[in-house]
Amino acid sequence: MKTKKSKCPLVNVLDIVGDKWSLVIIRDLFLRKKTFTDFMKSPEKIASNILSNRLEKMNKLGLLEAVKLPEDQKSKIYYLTEKGVDMFPVIFEMMNWSQRNLDLEYGTKTLKIFKAAEKASSSNFIKKYQSSYIKFRDNLIRV
């Protein structure tokens, strides 16, 4: 996707995922959420119209795809494409920056990720986490 706004790579990425909700949805997908209802249950309380808009936008940009559930053709399972999985290093480094620079409390899932990341180099942890998601995704879409 080409942008007419800028020749800056940062601006181009921000055009795609520069809003809070897109990154939260990508985070949730990495945390194994997969349905519209799952996303609606996130503690950030995204509005359903915004969620629909972001899912559609990220689908068009090739960050995620969706398949209908065999047992319920009204429901979809969302999952990250390879392009979406490639966002994990960015999200992980943003989380690390937050941990280093903001004096905040974090949820149990985040703390587990930080603890697991301590046991390996960032690059090895990122590869392992991405690989784990890809296995999850591949099993999910075989349904």
Image: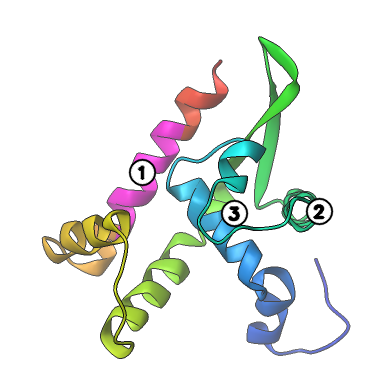
Query: Residue lying farthest right?
Result: 4
Separation of disc 1 and disc 2 at Cα?
32 Å
Instruction: Please state, as top left, top right, bottom left or bottom right, where the C terminus lies in the image.
Output: top right
Mark 1 or mark 3: which comes first in sequence? 3
The residue carrying mark 1 is: 131
For residue 124, say whether it is visible: no
* Highlighted range, magenta: 126-136
- Of the image marks 1 and 2, the number of the one nearer the N terminus: 2
Report the magenta stretch's main SS.
Answer: helix
Q: Does the magenta stretch include residue 130?
A: yes
Question: Element type at marker 1?
Answer: helix
Whether residue 90 is situated above or below residue 28 in the rendered picture: below
Any mark on residue 21, and which? none
| Extreme residue toward the left, this view | 119
Q: What residue type is labelled 3?
A: Lys
The residue pinned by badge 2 equals 49
The residue nearer to you, when weighing 45 against 69, is: 45
The nearer-to-camera label among 1 and 2 is 2
What residue is at 60 percent from the left and 58 percent from the top?
A: 45
Q: Name the residue under label 3.
A: 83
* Residue 83 percent location from the top left of the image: 59, 54
Residue 111 in picture, x, y percent from top left: 24, 61
Q: Which of marks 2 and 3 is in front?
A: 2
Q: How far apart are marks 2 and 3 (CA)?
A: 24 Å
Q: Where is residue 75 in the image (x, y as percent from the top left)?
A: 71, 25
Mark 1: give few (<14), some (14-19) or many (20+) Cα within 10 Å.
few
Of the two numbered discs 2 and 3 on the same chain, state the one appearing first in sequence: 2
Please state the total of marks drawn on the protein image: 3
